[in-house]
Amino acid sequence: MGGSDPRQRRSVGVLYRGRFAPSPTGPLHAGSLVAALASWLDARAHGGAWLVRIEDVDTPRCVPGADRLILDQLATCGLHSDEPVVWQSQRGALYQQALDRLIATGQAYPCACSRKDIEATLTAQGLVRERHHAAVYPGTCRPGRGGLRGRTARAWRFLVPTHSTVDWTDQQLGPQTQDVGTEVGDFVLKRADGLWAYQLAVVVDDAAQGITHVVRGADLTDNTPRQILLQRALGLPTPAYRHTPLVLGANGEKLSKQNGALALDLSDPVDALNRAAATLGLPPASGSVQDVLAGWTRAWASTISAPPPAAPHIATP
Ligand code: GLU
């Protein structure tokens, strides 16, 4: 699917729906603009639709007004959602339906463990959690392993299937593999504080919005196998995934709102876009916002030649 034949591009466009899904925990920073630009360019280069979804399920981390600020920043950069923006905080009924379906099919179970309980169990088993990594849930409340044993349910977890290795091909990073069972364990779908977990919300919304291509920062790469397992469990299609390079801070750590990444200076949006484009390996450009976006869209389209990646599959033993 080259970028040269407009008819071909249009026919592909019918099939392409991409999105940018920021969490409104602060304004856009240099790293999130890279993900926004990459997802927009990929959608445009395929003649597809680009949607914006505000991922505000983790309400304690959300900053009031950050959603509007992000939308304004995107608009300043010439990036406009092709459809009305959706807010995850208004979509709890959809997530509940999906959880109910997983419970009804025995693929989700209630969990009474606190973080302290999990740490204590892992320590008792001689397992030490690696720094920066969430603890692998030891399966204490798994059905068949004793379940709640009279304790009060706090959260809902996904029952990771026995054959839990997911192989998939990232459009940027190539072949990837993760054994979700041993590397992550049964992950949370609904948290003890009643909030929806990112993994469930993102899978439900990508499917509900008909997203065919997910383009996002490489810090989310290792979430993808969990999302693929959930798609399988819910009978939903798996989109193509492309994880884009991260912008690193002076300390070599990824830029994030959590480590105090500065808000973007958009007094010169073409300059900010050029910085983001450079991270994506695109050439410098000058002119209006519209001109530079159009030029990079052509450049991006010229690189789209590979067929879509093979559908991910769950390895059988
Ligand atoms: N809301 C996530 C973030 O801001 C992105 C989720 C996604 O693109 O799947 O990091």
Image (cartoon, rainbow, N blue to C red):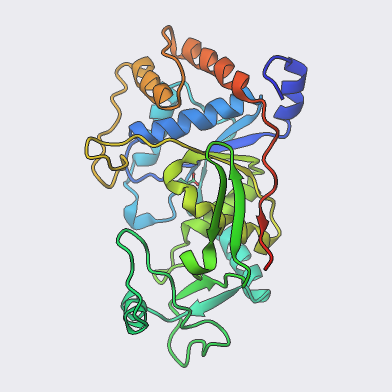
Residue displayed at 57% across by 65% down: 96
Nearer to the camera, 122 or 104: 122
Q: Quadrant of the C terminus?
A: bottom right
Quadrant, the N terminus: top right
205, 163: nearer the viewer: 163
Q: Say which residue appears at 67% left-offset and 40% top-offset.
A: 309
Q: Position of residue 228 (x, y in %)?
A: 61, 55
Residue 310 x %, y %: 70, 44
Report if residue 90 is visible in the image: no
Taking the view exactly as shown, the residue that stands out farthest to the bottom is 150
Q: Nearer the viewer, residue 162 or 264?
A: 162
Q: Which one is nearer the viewer's eye here, 39 or 223?
A: 223
x and y percentages locating residue 56 in the rendered image: 43, 50
Query: What residue lies at 62% left-to-right and 64% top-to-bottom?
Result: 97
113 above or below 311?
Answer: below
Quadrant in which residue 125 is drawn: bottom left
Quarter-wise, where is residue 229 in the image?
A: bottom right
- Residue at the limit of the structure toward the top, as seen here: 287
Query: Taking 25 as reference, is 188 left or right?
Result: right
Q: Quadrant of residue 27?
A: top left
Outermost residue to the front = 317
Q: Left of 71 or right of it: where is 226?
A: right
| Residue at the (57%, 60%) spot, across then down | 95
User: In the rendered picture of this protein, how many numbered marks are placed on residues?
Assistant: 0
The image shows residue 61, relative to residue 249, as above or below, that is below
What x and y, as percent, mark residue 276? 39, 25
Can residue 130 be seen in this snapshot? yes
